[in-house]
Each structure stands twice: as C-alpha cells, then as structure tokens.
Amino acid sequence: MTAWLAVLVPLLVMFFALGMERVESRMRESTVRQDELDELLERPRPDEVRALFRQGTVRALELFRLRNRGGRRGTRRSKVSP
C-alpha cells in the first residue's frame, strides 16, 4: 500500500501542475492591458458600459478598440451648434 502511495502521489501532483499550467496560459492570453482598461473607464460610452456589465471586460474592450480605430458602423456623432 505504501509503495502505491509513493508512486501515485507524485503522479497526481505532476498532472495537477500540468493542468494548472494550461489554465494559467489561457488566463495570460485573455488578460487586458491596464492602460486600455483605465482609458475605457475614464471615457465610457453607454454600449461599452452595457457590454462591461453583461458580458465582461473582454467584450467591452473589443467595443472600445473598435471605437478608437473608427471601424464601427453606425456611430452617432453629437451635433455641434454653430
């Protein structure tokens, strides 16, 4: 019984470490830059706030990046009185 534990415990620890490495790599890829998040929170638009609330940071930052690139269709411009 002790021999099985001596073999089984290190194998379990190794598989756990490999699994956690995969989780960590996925988290590293999905992280956002702090300066982008700060800029989003300083000047949010209603659709970005809605996306942040309903779908999370990643979707809100996608909308923010589209706005900064100017690649968004149907953007509303505020009317400036002369």
Image: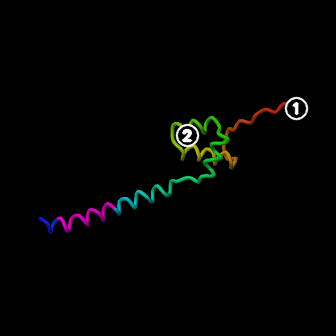
Dot 2 alpha-carbon crowd within 10 angstroms: few under 14, some 14 to 19, many 20 or more: some
77 or 41: nearer the viewer: 41
Q: CA distance from mark 2 to mark 1?
A: 35 Å
In which quadrant of the rendered image does the C terminus lie? Answer: top right
Q: Residue 64 in the image: x percent, y percent?
A: 63, 45
Q: Residue furthest right?
A: 82
Q: Residue furthest top?
A: 81
Residue that appears at 79% across and 32% down: 79
Residue that appears at 56% across and 52% down: 32
Q: Residue 7 in the image: x percent, y percent?
A: 20, 68
20 or 73: nearer the viewer: 20
Classify mark 1: helix, strand or loop.
loop
Question: Looking at the picture, does residue 54 appear above or below residue 5?
Answer: above
Residue that appears at 84% across and 30% down: 81
Give the magenta range.
5-16
Q: Residue furthest left?
A: 1
Q: Of the residues shown, which amino acid type is indicated by label 2?
A: Leu
Q: Earlier in the sequence, mark 2 or mark 1?
A: 2
The residue to which callout 2 is attached is 52
**Left or right: 14 in relation to 59:** left
The residue to which callout 1 is attached is 82
In contact (CB < 8 Å): disc 2 and disc 1: no
In which quadrant of the rendered image does the N terminus lie? Answer: bottom left
Q: Of the residues shown, which amino acid type is indicated by label 1?
A: Pro
Dot 1 alpha-carbon crowd within 10 angstroms: few under 14, some 14 to 19, many 20 or more: few
Q: Residue 5 in the image: x percent, y percent?
A: 18, 64
Q: Residue 68 in the image: x percent, y percent?
A: 68, 48
Verify whether residue 68 appears in magenta.
no
